[in-house]
């Protein structure tokens, strides 16, 4: 007994950071809002094992950034570990470009909290809105940092209003800037009731803020917090003073429960407000103990298992990113949800039903990678040597199999034929494509047997361009690419019941498979769902997976235009079997026939990918931009006009958006810009369906 207690104590003592001192966060931002700069500044302050002494902060930061860039180390790594106020902060990379929604989804899955960066001039942009919604879906607690307060036109209050209105978030400013643009000369910390002044060139001593104004702001913050937090309300009504630590604790409770989003401000480029931001990460964002335990299922019984955040629990982790590092090899990044594990041990991958050896383990720091023997609950590590584990897979202790929900990725919407510029590069091309596809689940490769072509598909033109650029840069392969082709899909609109019977009784061994399936439209984006509702042994259990496989194969091409059929729910509820003649093959064929027949009767339609596009244009070109969009079947969702610029948000079919970048450039003299990402699949208008399909129309 004593030994066991001592062992536990030993274990607890051996943690480098107690769990409550761990923060797994992502920095989320619209492209150009300053994510890279802010991350670099954070790592400058918190990422180093030694500091640059008393060198003037500005130049030291720049020197450090240059060095880091030259060495090309882990600022861009999938996860970086740093330390602040005796807390361990793991920064999990989220991509700057929303074309890569898969990346955003996968990083949001494994982080506990997020820092959302906004450009103080541009405010809330479309991309931030998209990521915000995804963060809502995963219940990620957030704080906001309004960056670029040093830029002319930066408007803190307007951005806060936009956060409230466009993101429908209860934004709670815990700071306000003193001045903005060139006169950005301080930050008022409303929680601690103090001003942090910055000397500015024009007036070194200009950051005075009246005492009364300070007290007023502080009081207003307390009142707003009291309105939401009962503990604070009781103290307030009692007429008691609310201390800074009580106020911080209340803001922490409200942030973690997703009831408020604290808002901070600063300038990453000028290193203003970054240390306060780090304080806020520690003070307000959740530790692994503050979030709900990760929910998994028992892969055999399907029963729910909670993986509690504790080193004493059995080990469980989710692989959230796979990278092929040119020097190290294949690195799989893991988030450990429960227990601890040693490098080199055999773990179970229940997603693939395989055991494999966990190779070396690394923690990535800003300026080095550290090999560790063991990794604990809450940590983020990169593992070298896993062969079959990929993004979205679970790893766990073989004695307690648990399976986390895999990370769902959107289906690619665009494909394009590629061939190497020189024939000798074919093998290199295949190799580089395979490696890139391993890293990115929304990037797929197909070899068309009929034409002999290699087709690549992804989430948009830019996505594919970036991947081709990487093929050249990282693998030295130059490719010729064909015209991009839209990936149309089909779906059904009504529920049907369908029978499939596969019976062969001539000569040799007979075949017998018979199923009744219910085929229903699924929710948009749900993909393919399969259910087994067979009662009283009408079909033995061993054939159910063949029925599922047969249904899946049948959905690979629909009857309207031969496109894959998506968002369909198939339930097997009845059928029959033959003691001798039934086989997996026969049930597969029966299900195939039932689904083929069923989707024909279920009023199929063709779906096309729709993109959400945001264009920022000087007002003088707004009319032309809208005219161009109207010719592309665009649905304009809103126009937000500010001073000289307008931001137009619209939904446009992917098929219509080709060449838009060039047209936008020429009609705006190169001054308008746009971002685009996949939004959803929607029904293709009937009059256009004829252009892509052969047999058209609802039903046949
Ligand atoms: P990312 O695309 O979100 O990673 O943005 P970057 O960090 O690359 O920044 C985009 C541009 O904005 C760069 O030119 C930065 O120098 C600039 N920038 C970033 N932060 C600030 C800031 O606080 N103030 C100003 N004036 N510029 C900034």
Image (cartoon, rainbow, N blue to C red):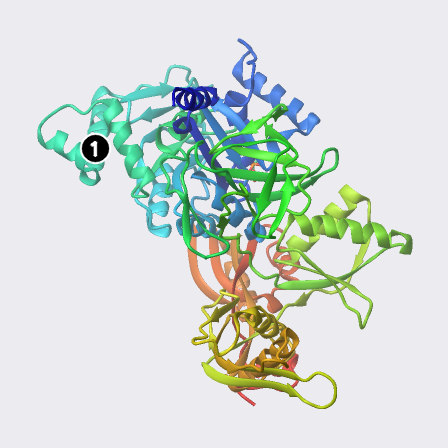
Quadrant of the rendered image holding ligand 1: top right
Q: Is residue 189 above or below residue 510?
A: above
Q: Is residue 53 above or below residue 341?
A: above
Q: In which quadrant of the rendered view does residue 205 lie?
A: top left
Residue drawn at (53%, 56%) of the image: 408
The location of residue 459, given as percent across then percent down, is: 61, 58
Q: In which quadrant of the rendered view does residue 1 lie?
A: top left
Locate residue 70 relative to residue 42 in the image: left or right.
right
Q: Can residue 531 be seen in this snapshot?
A: yes
Q: Is residue 298 above or below residue 188?
A: below
Residue drawn at (35%, 36%) of the image: 290
Residue that mark 1 sits on:
220
The location of residue 589, given as percent across then percent down, is: 63, 79
The location of residue 546, given as percent across then percent down, is: 60, 71
Q: Residue furthest top?
A: 54
- Does label 1 point to a residue whose CB lies under 8 Å from ligand 1? no
Q: Quadrant of the C terminus?
A: bottom right
Locate residue 462 relative to residue 143 in the image: left or right.
right
Mark 1 residue crowding within 10 angstroms, few (<14) / some (14–19) / many (20+): few
**Which element carries disc 1, helix, strand or loop?**
helix
Residue drawn at (25%, 23%) of the image: 244
């Amino acid at each position: 007994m004593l030994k066991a207690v001592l062992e536990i104590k030993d274990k607890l003592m051996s943690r480098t950071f107690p769990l409550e001192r761990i923060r797994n966060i992502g920095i989320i931002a619209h492209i150009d809002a300053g994510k890279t700069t802010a991350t670099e500044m954070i790592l400058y302050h918190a990422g180093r094992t030694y500091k640059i002494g008393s060198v003037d902060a500005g130049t030291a930061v720049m020197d450090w950034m240059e060095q880091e860039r030259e060495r090309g180390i882990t600022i861009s790594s999938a996860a970086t570990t740093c330390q602040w106020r005796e807390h361990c902060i793991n920064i999990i990379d989220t991509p700057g470009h929303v074309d890569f929604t898969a990346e955003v989804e996968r990083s949001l899955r494994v982080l506990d909290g997020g820092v959302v960066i906004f450009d103080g001039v541009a405010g809330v942009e479309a991309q931030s809105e998209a990521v915000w919604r995804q963060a809502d879906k995963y219940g990620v607690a957030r704080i906001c940092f309004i960056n670029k307060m040093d830029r002319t036109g930066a408007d803190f209050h307007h951005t806060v209003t936009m956060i409230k209105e466009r993101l429908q978030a209860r934004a709670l400013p815990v700071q306000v800037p003193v001045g903005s643009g060139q006169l950005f000369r301080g930050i008022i910390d409303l929680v601690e009731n103090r001003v942090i002044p910055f000397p500015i060139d024009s007036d070194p001593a200009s950051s005075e803020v009246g005492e009364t104004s300070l007290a007023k702001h502080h009081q207003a913050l307390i009142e707003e917090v009291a309105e939401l937090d009962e503990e604070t309300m009781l103290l307030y009504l009692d007429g008691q003073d609310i201390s800074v630590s009580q106020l911080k604790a209340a803001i922490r409770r409200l942030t973690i429960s997703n009831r408020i989003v604290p808002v901070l401000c600063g300038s990453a480029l000028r290193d203003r407000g970054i240390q306060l931001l780090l304080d806020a990460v520690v003070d307000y964002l959740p530790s692994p103990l503050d979030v709900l335990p990760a929910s998994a299922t028992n892969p055999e019984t399907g029963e729910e298992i909670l993986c509690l955040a504790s080193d004493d629990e059995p080990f469980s982790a989710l692989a959230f990113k796979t990278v092929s590092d040119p020097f190290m090899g294949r690195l799989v990044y893991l988030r450990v949800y429960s227990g601890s594990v040693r490098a080199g041990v055999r773990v179970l991958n229940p997603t693939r039903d395989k055991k494999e050896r966990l190779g070396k383990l690394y923690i990535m720091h800003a300026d080095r990678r550290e090999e560790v023997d063991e990794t604990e609950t809450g940590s983020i590590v990169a593992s070298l040597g896993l062969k079959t584990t990929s993004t979205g897979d679970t790893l766990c202790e073989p004695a307690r199999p648990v399976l986390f929900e895999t990370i769902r990725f959107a289906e690619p919407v665009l494909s394009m034929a590629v061939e190497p510029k020189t024939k000798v590069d074919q093998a290199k091309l295949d190799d580089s494509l395979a490696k890139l596809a391993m890293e990115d689940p929304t990037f797929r490769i197909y070899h068309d047997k009929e034409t002999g072509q290699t087709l690549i598909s992804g989430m948009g033109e830019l996505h594919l361009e970036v991947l081709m650029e990487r093929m050249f840069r990282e693998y030295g392969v130059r490719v010729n690419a064909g015209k991009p082709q839209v990936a149309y899909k089909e779906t059904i609109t009504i529920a049907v019941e369908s029978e499939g019977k596969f019976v062969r009784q001539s000569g040799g061994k007979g075949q017998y498979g018979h199923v009744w399936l219910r085929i229903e439209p699924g929710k948009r984006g749900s993909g393919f769902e399969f259910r087994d509702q067979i009662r009283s042994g009408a079909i033995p259990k061993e054939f159910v997976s063949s029925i599922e496989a047969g249904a899946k194969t049948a959905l690979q091409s629909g009857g309207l235009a031969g496109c894959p059929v998506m968002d369909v729910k198939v339930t097997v509820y009845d059928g029959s079997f033959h003691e001798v003649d039934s086989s997996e093959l026969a049930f597969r064929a029966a299900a195939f026939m039932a689904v083929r027949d069923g989707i024909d009767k279920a009023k199929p339609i063709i779906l096309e990918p729709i993109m959400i596009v945001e264009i920022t244009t000087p007002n003088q070109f707004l009319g032309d931009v809208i005219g161009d969009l109207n010719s592309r079947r665009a649905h304009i969702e809103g126009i937000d006009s500010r001073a000289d610029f307008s931001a137009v948000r619209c939904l446009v079919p992917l098929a219509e958006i080709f060449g838009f970048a060039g047209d936008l450039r020429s009609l705006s003299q190169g001054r308008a810009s746009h971002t685009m990402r996949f939004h959803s699949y929607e029904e293709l208008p009937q009059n256009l369906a004829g252009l892509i399909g052969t047999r058209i129309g609802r039903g046949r």
